[in-house]
Amino acid sequence: GNSVTQMEGPVTLSEEAFLTINCTYTATGYPSLFWYVQYPGEGLQLLLKATKADDKGSNKGFEATYRKETTSFHLEKGSVQVSDSAVYFCALSSPNRDDKIIFGKGTRLHILP
Amino acid sequence: ETGVTQTPRHLVMGMTNKKSLKCEQHLGHNAMYWYKQSAKKPLELMFVYNFKEQTENNSVPSRFSPECPNSSHLFLHLHTLQPEDSALYLCASSQEGQGWGYTFGSGTRLTVV
């Protein structure tokens, strides 16, 4: 079945460091891929998405590229800020499963000033 | 109002109480979801409604009773809960077939005492 695997957290970085959060997936067909972010005390917000191979999603300085050959969708940011501290969820939806979204377990990110 | 609105934001209830969580979406979506988010556990999908019809119930105990009177409103009725039911309850909506992902509310933080 469809599944998403993302790196275990927590991840702790200093401000202005480079961020990578790894995400790989297993799916039949051609899923859409997402990154959601959850700030403390809030629900999940869509951060970025990509709908086909080689697409790059980007938002707020974050980027992720849909790599079909490696079934990956790693999240990157060149220079993180304290305000990026949150939990990040990788997810996929499959058009042949009524767009049902499968979430990863989430990666908690702490940015130190 | 826009987006997905959940009320109340916080709820404390005794194990013998009956309470309800409310979710309202102003996006014209045709599907709505209830998720449970407990500390250090993955997101748990509880219920799915498409066009007001329940299409998924992931073995949720009967002390949780969903209601979807129309495609814009979703309720979760709670009765005789247990302390382990304390969690963040998230509502989400989507437009099936569009592949745009889910829009989440801010959640209700439930504490059962």
Image (cartoon, coloured by chain):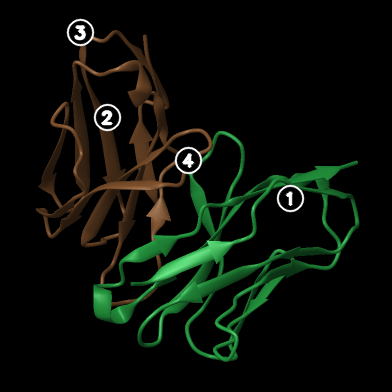
Chain colours: A green, B brown
> Measuring 65% from the left and 75% from the top, which residue is drawn there?
A64
Q: Nearer the viewer, residue B87 or B97?
A: B87
Tell me: B65 left or right of A106: left
The N terminus of chain B appears in which quarter of the rendering? top left
Pointer 4 residue: B41
Pointer 1 residue: A84
Rendered position, B51 above or below A66: above
Amino acid type, mark 3: Thr
Q: Which mark is residue B93?
A: none
Mark toward the start of the polypeptide (2 vs 4): 2
Instruction: Write down the quadrant of residue A19 in the picture.
Output: bottom right
Tell me: A46 left or right of B11: right
Pointer 3 residue: B16
Identify the secondary structure beneath mark 1: helix
Amino acid type, mark 4: Lys
Q: Residues within 10 Å of mark 1 (few under 14, many from 20)?
A: some
Amino acid type, mark 2: Leu
> Measuring 31% from the left and 80% from the top, which residue is drawn there?
A95
Identify the secondary structure beneath mark 3: loop
